[in-house]
Image: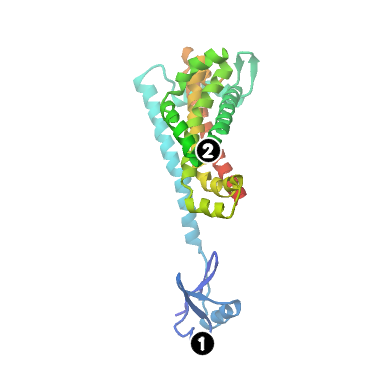
Amino acid sequence: MPYPCLKRYRFGFSTCLPPMAPRLGLVNLRTGLSGASIRCNLLEVVNLLLCSGSCLMVENGPQKQRRIGVIFLNGFVYPGIGFGLLIFLWWFAATFLTNLMPTPIQAFYSNLEYITQPFYRHGPGDVGIGWLLLQSLRRVLTGFILGSIVAIPLGVWMGLSPVAMRIFYPVVQVLRPVSPVAWLPIALALFNSANPSAIFVIFITSLWATLINTYLGVTSVPRDYIKVAEVLEMPRWRQIYKIILPASVPYIFTGLRISLGIAWLVIVAVEMLTGGQGIGFFIWDEWNRLNLGSVYLAIFVIGSTGLLLDLFLSGVQGAFRKWLE
């Protein structure tokens, strides 16, 4: 019976050999800390193939088809079932529970202009949903970037300095549970304008999760690494760049993703209260017109945009980690 002689792994070859193979000098057995391993060079592999008549262990057709089927099932079929159930519940509620809600088909046809022409301009107050989305994204990203610029250095400082932690941590714990919308009257009193007030609320919203996760990331760095760096007389800025920051990257980006998600939630409520152009005010305006089909479209746009923002930050995290390495 032929022996399956070779499996291709990431770091080399592993063989499954006949019992007489070690005696024939075909392989060199080594025993290490990780257990018994078999190492063979190219000539030995060729000799073994000629002697045993075995072939390379490769993925056959049924295995490949099975893997593709699992990917298709998990990536398309199951999510399709979930969205299908959601659309069915929408149709059921619109058909049997209320007369105000449109069915999915009615909502689709009523929003064809928004879907096919998202960037149209018919006047100062009549623009496509694409322009409204860009207005909201501009406010969110501006406040989020400003909040991150403040939160990350402050979190690093709190993690490195016990005095700074004792000063700022109680303040953070008191202000963190406050609803972001509660800051809107204070912002309106400070800026007397809707747009900077919305940015200020997003700025406050973006602080807490990023700051706390950065602080936790810095404090999770083993103290032995810092002591070795101090023995080597490494400057403080170099310790932060070479040791603390790479170890804290997963924590920092977790905080950034949470902060961005919350900021994207809050902007809808803020724009409903302040008015002007934006996806939040668009929802409120369409509700006042009893046009719930457009409200459903806005909900879909908000959810899809939030998913894309999270995927973008995940990609930035991977690129930043490779850059640090």
Left or right of 119 in this view: 161: left
* Residue 64 in the image, given as x and y percentages of width and height: 50, 59
Note whether 270 is above or below 323 in the view shown.
Answer: above
Which circle, 1 or 2, is nearer the viewer?
A: 2
- Coloring basis for residues: rainbow
Q: How many marks?
A: 2
Residue 53 in view in this figure: yes
Marks 1 and 2 close (CB-CB < 8 Å): no
* Residue 190 in the image, given as x and y percentages of width and height: 55, 15
Report crowding for label 2: few under 14, some 14 to 19, many 20 or more residues within 10 A (C-alpha): some
Which residue is at 46% across, 81% downward?
18
Note whether 27 is above or below 96 in the view shown.
Answer: below
* Residue 215 in the image, given as x and y percentages of width and height: 48, 39
Viewer-proximal residue among 43 and 88: 43
Going by the numbered disc 1, the residue's amino acid type is Leu
Viewer-proximal residue among 219 and 26: 219
Q: Which element carries disc 2, helix, strand or loop?
A: helix
Viewer-proximal residue among 178 and 127: 178
Q: Which residue is mark 1?
A: 24
Task: Name the residue at the bottom extreme.
Answer: 24
Which quadrant would the N terminus be assigned to in this image? Answer: bottom left
Task: Name the residue at the left extreme.
Answer: 97
- Label disc, if present, on residue 159 of the rendered structure: none
Viewer-proximal residue among 107 and 55: 55
- How far apart are the two marked residues, 1 and 2, measured between alpha carbons? 65 Å
Report crowding for label 1: few under 14, some 14 to 19, many 20 or more residues within 10 A (C-alpha): few
Going by the numbered disc 2, the residue's amino acid type is Trp
Q: Earlier in the sequence, mark 1 or mark 2?
A: 1
* Residue 209 in the image, given as x and y percentages of width and height: 47, 34
Q: Which residue is mark 2?
A: 157
Q: Which element carries disc 1, helix, strand or loop?
A: loop
